[in-house]
Amino acid sequence: MGPGMMNAPGSGLGQAEELYFNFRASFNEALALAVFVSAALALVVSMIFSRGVIAPVQEMMSVSQRIAEGHYNERVQVRGEDELSQLARCFNTMAGQLEQIETMRRQLIGDVAHELRTPLTAIKGSMEGLMDGILPASDETFGQIHQEADRLSRLVDDLQELSRVEAATFKLDLRPVAVVDLVDSALGRLSRQYEEKGVTLTSGLPADLPLVQVDEDRVGQVLLNLIGNALQYTPAGGNVQISATRDGDEVRITVTDTGIGLPAEHIPHIFDRFYRADKSRSRRAGGGSGIGLTIARHLVEAHGGRIWAESEGGGQGSRFTFTVKAAK
């Protein structure tokens, strides 16, 4: 076979080359198409994914802006169980707490305005009576004005103390203290008021009570608030008793009175600020500022304890109990 026959048209080598070129062209076309389709799919998937990520974030940004403008009832939608959904739930929880704080702030402003108005109105009325000559310029008149001013001063002091305990801007000086010392100190400070009203104040403490790990001044304030509250709502001839028992690593201190009692519907709210179970008792009639029990609750909780009220109903007396940690 001669050389010319190897490169002749239609030979096997020429067909192979043509097949190779055709295959390469088809492969390049298929590769280009695959790249294009992959790029298009990647673009579509990235757009979908981006919308899934960016849309919730943008919604949170929009809602947070509205909350900053004072619309505390705004919430974001929660979709699914992924990390963004968990973030949305946390965001809604934060928004709910902000709404609650704003509600409490508005309520506090209204309550304070109401509580300050009563003594201020009494003082203003007395002064106008003096200026018009309706009231005599006597010691009795000036005594009434001084009494209202003193009540106003105590209310302002209570509000200041309430703001401190609610903001937890105080430090506890914890040390071992005997419960009997706490009770004796409270009895010594309030016994005269009890004698003047004709209410019996007693204490019955077991001899084997352990020391408690507390801030003596703060827990003493809790006792004063509870014993003072019992005096306000116990009529003459009644009794108030202080008792204590050990319960595991805690000591329970209870103030029991034979006063007007608490209907069941009032017990969950008795530690709310400015709350009075007996709406007919004004501050001037001895109803107090309505802050003492709220302060007591915050001080007890700051010690890691609990406080609660119990009563069999109206006219059946009340029991106020709080716990503190026993000293180790």
Image (tube, rainbow, N blue to C red):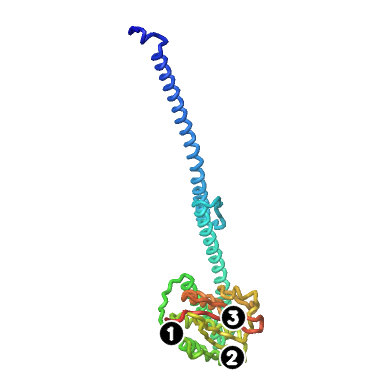
Q: Nearer the viewer, residue 67 or 132?
A: 67
Q: Which residue is mark 2?
A: 199
Q: Count numbered badges in the picture.
A: 3
Label 2 crowding class (10 Å Cα cut-off): few <14, some 14-19, many 20+? Answer: many
- Outermost right residue: 314
Q: Quadrant of residue 5?
A: top left
Judge whether 306 appears above or below 3 on screen. Answer: below
Quadrant in which the C terminus appears: bottom left
- Outermost left residue: 3
Circle nearer the N terminus (2, 3): 2
Judge whether 258 appears above or below 91 on screen. Answer: below
- Circles 3 and 1: CB atoms closer than 8 Å: no
Task: Report the mark closest to the observer, 1 or 2.
Answer: 1
Q: Quadrant of residue 103?
A: bottom right
What amino acid type is highlighted by mark number 3? Gly
Label 3 secondary element? helix
Q: Which residue is mark 3?
A: 287
Q: Which residue is mark 1?
A: 177
Label 1 secondary element? strand
